[in-house]
Amino acid sequence: MIDGRAVVHPSARIDSSANIGPFAVIGEDVEIGPDTRIDSHAVIEGPTRIGSSNHIYSFASIGGDPQDKKYRGEHTWLIIGDHNTIREYTTINRGTVQGGGKTVIGDDNWIMAYVHVAHDCLIGSHTIAANGSALAGHVVIDDYVGIGAFAKIYQFCRVGCHAFIGFDSGVTQDVPPYVTVSGTPAEPHGINSEGLKRCGFTPSQMRVIKESYRILYRRNLMLEEALNKISELAKENHELDPVIEVIRNSKRGIAR
């Protein structure tokens, strides 16, 4: 399943069911799991671990050195899970020692053409990153996040689960779960109702999430006051637990 025109380093470990296209380059210390397809002219550098049933399209550059001036050739990692689609000209860099040593991509993510994922990013599962969007270093993207085309997310920001980043937005602070933001700097514009419906949230759950949004954004409360009220609401509505966790652990502040 390895095309004779591909360039594969002797140390690379490629499952017998994987498919490596012509002129692909598979570097040193790369591991590729079952049923993963690497199309022509893609470049995979190591140390990189790629799980099963992924599809990496032509001209993607995966596992390259971090674009960080502090990087001095240390042994750092890129880890990619299962069932991911990574389209043309995407760049995903390995981690840095200062940032924990690894960049991680979870499962079932859809990463469109020309997306950039910088060093030490942690991306969950079931996310979508549209064409030309870019993540700076140390960004955390939780599960089921949608990122619009050409959106930019500043370093060390976190985007909570089921949030949505609008087209061409600039995210400079953390985005709570379920919230839609847009603009530069990104500002809140309600909850991600369509995404929640697609994920099977009930009308009752969505009412609770909308109420938490009103508490956080519409009642002119200080953040600590809003957090206390949402915590009370969460005692019987555990879908708000991720909201509380993101607010409490925010390091860049919440986009408000």
Image (spheres, helix red, strand yellow):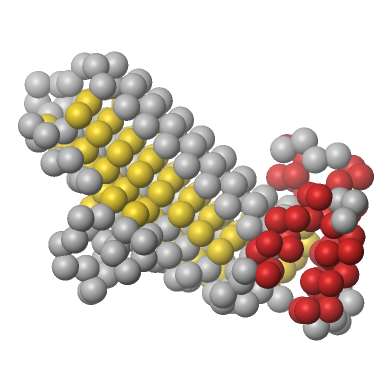
> Is residue 247 visible in this depiction of the protein?
yes
Q: Quadrant of residue 227?
A: bottom right
Observer-nearest of 126 and 194: 126
Residue 199 on image: x %, y % = 72, 38
Observer-nearest of 127 and 168: 127
In this picture, is 36 found above or below 177? above
Q: Quadrant of residue 26?
A: top left
In this picture, is 134 found above or below 39? below
Residue 156 on image: x %, y % = 48, 70
- Left or right of 113, for residue 242: right
Q: Quadrant of residue 30?
A: top left
Q: Residue at x 62, y 77 (%)?
A: 253
Q: Quadrant of the N terminus?
A: top left
Q: Residue at x 38, y 41 (%)?
A: 80
Observer-nearest of 18 and 5: 18
Q: Residue at x 20, y 55 (%)?
A: 75
Residue 74 on image: x %, y % = 19, 61
In the image as oriented, which residue stretches furthest toward the front?
235
